[in-house]
Amino acid sequence: AQSVTQPDIHITVSEGASLELRCNYSYGATPYLFWYVQSPGQGLQLLLKYFSGDTLVQGIKGFEAEFKRSQSSFNLRKPSVHWSDAAEYFCAVGAGANNLFFGTGTRLTVIP
Amino acid sequence: KAGVTQTPRYLIKTRGQQVTLSCSPISGHRSVSWYQQTPGQGLQFLFEYFSETQRNKGNFPGRFSGRQFSNSRSEMNVSTLELGDSALYLCASSRDGSSGANVLTFGAGSRLTVL
């Protein structure tokens, strides 16, 4: 069965500090992996995706993620966080026919 | 180009009523998916439509239904509303995607409150 685990419910970082959000998945086939961001009262915006190829993928807003098959992980990183990055972040695995399994999300707070 | 449009954005209903939510996908997108987001259960897949046919369905009771029109616009309906149906309902569209290798574009959602 498919599942996605985001072990950190809430993370607080100072503006300018680096960020890593963890994501572990369980999926029986080739995983299609995604990171989405959601600001309060808004829908989900795609940050980046991994389908195949280079395991380090670049996304929008300076985010990147690394797919590690041996660890079943797809962690999201950003070298320097901006106050506008405060939001909720969701990792997801694609299970076919546009059926995404989402993690429970990580809420990011940025301290000025 | 215009994004995914969901209407209404906010609505309040009482228990036992029914509700219909609408979703207009991005032009050229033929697949529409619906998700329910609640604080307790998170984001859960409801169903997906492609070319007016339901291709996939999540684990929700029959009170939750949907349909897609020939112009790819979609509606979802919840009958006999329960307090637990209070949620943000998100619609997402994509060009196709019978596999998981497909990018979904989400709308801003319809916030349903059941009193």
Image: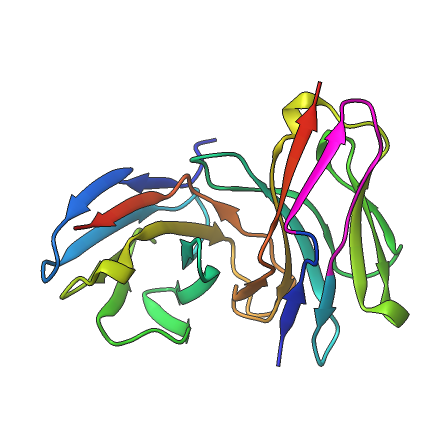
**What residue is at 28 percent from the left and 61 percent from the top?**
B84
* Residue A48 drawn at (x, y percent): 71, 45
Using the image, determine if residue A28 lies above or below residue A92: below
Using the image, determine if residue A21 lies above or below residue B35: above
* Residue B105 drawn at (x, y percent): 52, 46
The answer to which quarter of the image holds residue A78 is: top right
Q: Work out whether residue A51 or residue B89 is closer to the camera in this orientation and state it.
A: B89
Q: Is residue A10 magenta?
A: yes
Q: Work out whether residue A64 or residue B39 is closer to the camera in this orientation and state it.
A: B39
Q: Work out whether residue B13 or residue B105 is closer to the camera in this orientation and state it.
A: B13
**What residue is at 62 percent from the left and 65 percent from the top?**
A94
Q: Is residue A12 left or right of residue B23?
A: right
The answer to which quarter of the image holds residue A100 is: bottom right
* Residue B27 drawn at (x, y percent): 42, 42
Q: Which residues are magenta?
A: A9-23
Using the image, determine if residue B114 lies above or below residue B107: below
Q: Is residue B54 left or right of residue B99?
A: left
Using the image, determine if residue B1 lies above or below residue B51: above
Query: What count of labels does the image hold?
Result: 0
**What residue is at 52 percent from the left and 66 percent from the top?**
A99
Q: Residue furthest top?
A: A112
**What residue is at 43 percent from the left and 32 percent from the top?**
B2
**Which coloring applies here?**
rainbow
Q: Is residue B22 visible?
A: yes
* Residue A110 drawn at (x, y percent): 68, 28
Q: Is residue A91 left or right of residue A58?
A: left
Q: Is residue B8 visible?
A: no
